[in-house]
Image (cartoon, helix red, strand yellow):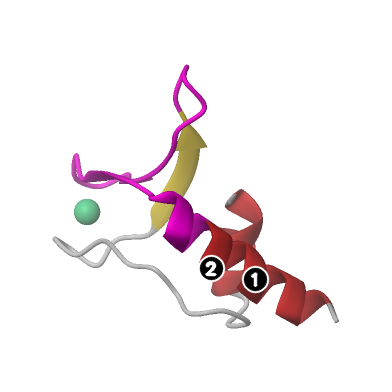
């Protein structure tokens, strides 16, 4: 997930911005291994569903090739 955000900063995959203030989003996992993204400048936090997560992994793999 943090890999995706690194690639996004390099413009290789679609950038994800905070919908509230367009701030940079960071990724983390909670104690139950649920992936979520959060914004540093406001308190925005969103859990990523498995579908979106798999979609992102697909994009990362496409970049690696
Ligand atoms: Zn924000």
Quadrant position of residue 64: bottom right
Quadrant of the rendering where the C terminus is positioned: bottom right
Up the image or down, 44 lies above or below 22; here it is above
> Going 19% across and 39% down the picture, which residue do you hit?
43
Query: Residue 58 — which label?
Result: 1
Q: How far apart are labels 1 and 2 at the CA level?
A: 5 Å
How would you rate the neighbour count of disc 1 (Cα within 10 Å): few for under 14, some for 14-19, many for 20 or more?
Answer: few
Secondary structure, mark 2, is helix
Which residue position holds label 2? 55
Up the image or down, 7 lies above or below 52; here it is below
Q: Which residues are magenta?
A: 30-53
Quadrant position of residue 60: bottom right
Horizontal and vertical percent for residue 56? 56, 66
Q: Indicate left or right for 62 with 20 as reference.
A: right
Marks 1 and 2 in Cβ contact (< 8 Å) = yes
Secondary structure, mark 1, is helix
């Amino acid at each position: 997930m943090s890999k995706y955000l690194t690639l996004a900063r390099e413009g290789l995959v679609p950038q994800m911005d905070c919908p509230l203030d367009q701030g940079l989003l960071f990724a983390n996992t909670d104690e139950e291994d649920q992936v979520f993204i959060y914004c540093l400048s406001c308190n925005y936090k969103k859990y990523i569903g498995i579908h979106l997560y798999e979609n992102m992994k697909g994009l990362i793999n496409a970049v690696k090739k």
